[in-house]
Image: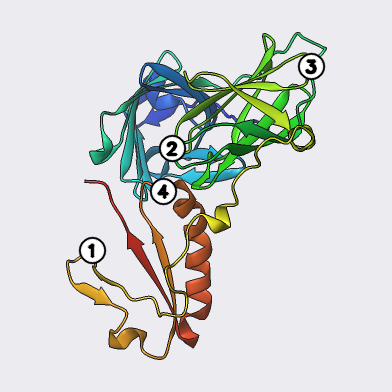
Amino acid sequence: MRTNSAVLAGLLFGVAGLVTPSPAAAQSLAGLWDATVTVNKLDIPFRFEIAGEGAAIKGSFFNGDDKVTSTSGSFANGSLTLSFDEYGTELVATLKDGRLEGEYSRGTRGAPYPFQAKRFSPVVVGDTSIPSIAGLWNIQVKSSKGEAAWQLIVRQSGAEASAAILRVDGDTGTLTGSYRDGKFVLSHFSGARPALLELTPAADGTLAVVQGRDTALTAYKSDQARAKGLPEPSDPSRFTSVKDPTEPLRFSFPDLAGKVVSNTDDKFRGKVVIVNIGGSWCPNCHDEAPFLSDLYRKYRGQGLEVVLLSFEEA
């Protein structure tokens, strides 16, 4: 894990004499932080990064190596505020004794998450006999969407590991963590979808998989699962389809200003139109949005239009 921390100290000299700033004003927040949000009384640890100072300060969540960076922020008199416009959320925290404490407001999506953070420090792993769990796994499950199995992908480097669970309706994002006390404890918070995952290796080569406080599921190495004849993970590409693929896709939705936009509008006539179906609650939609934005900027002069049909929560 890369560390990029810095502590700035300074003296301000005024015309009338020497002025010493308060500790909160003198300290820079720049660098990596070990943070947590509390969700349903469960602490979710995650990596957090702060860059810049004052009115130019930015904060970043992570999805693996991908950053989700605030759109605006400020730090003054020990008070930090960061806004994440794409999620409609805000982080407000106070610096005290080198720690940040506050809450992550989720707008209309429910109560805020309590937030805490301290300066990043590497995890010390005393156990030298660390089991290898890297590879593809088959998690046996009975989901509400009719799935009999999920796919678990694990990458590992010594005591450090990262993982993601793939389902028919998307993935968990990249959860990261390390091995301690006989299990791998991995977590994730990218500004949305907080998750905590425990992977405990068993003597028979399987993994006990616990998400949050859920009952443990059993994961088998993919080849082991096939040898046992266990159900395979569902194919996500076959989960959703259109009734008649020969029919053109028709849409008619109000835009942000309340004006109805339809596929028959003149602005779309004779153009290539990409219709994306999603919502601000959808993590995968946030993942793909930058690619669609780049595509639009590159080809809009040649007749490309991009429309998002955004299904929002109340």
Expressed as whole percent of the image width and height from the top left, the position of residue 98 reads 46, 17
Name the side, left or right, on which 114 lies relative to 171.
left
Kindly identify which numbered label has been placed on residue 144. Answer: 2
> Comparing marks 4 and 2, which lies closer to the viewer?
2
Judging by the rendered image, the residue that carries numbered circle 1 is 256
Which quadrant of the view contains residue 81? Answer: top left
> Comparing marks 4 and 1, which lies closer to the viewer?
4
Q: Identify which amino acid the numbered label 2 is placed on.
A: Ser
Q: Residue at x 48, y 33 (%)?
A: 189
SS under mark 2: loop
Judging by the rendered image, the residue that carries numbered circle 4 is 282
Asked if marks 4 and 1 touch (Cβ < 8 Å), the reply is no
Asked if marks 3 and 2 touch (Cβ < 8 Å), the reply is no
Asked if residue 10 can be seen in this view, the reply is yes
- The answer for how far apart the CA atoms under marks 4 and 1 are is 18 Å
Asked if marks 3 and 4 touch (Cβ < 8 Å), the reply is no
Judging by the rendered image, the residue that carries numbered circle 3 is 130
Q: Residue at x 41, y 29 (%)?
A: 12
- The answer for how far apart the CA atoms under marks 4 and 2 are is 18 Å
Q: Identify which amino acid the numbered label 3 is placed on.
A: Ile
SS under mark 1: loop
Of mark 1 and mark 3, the one earlier in the sequence is 3
In this picture the colour scheme is rainbow
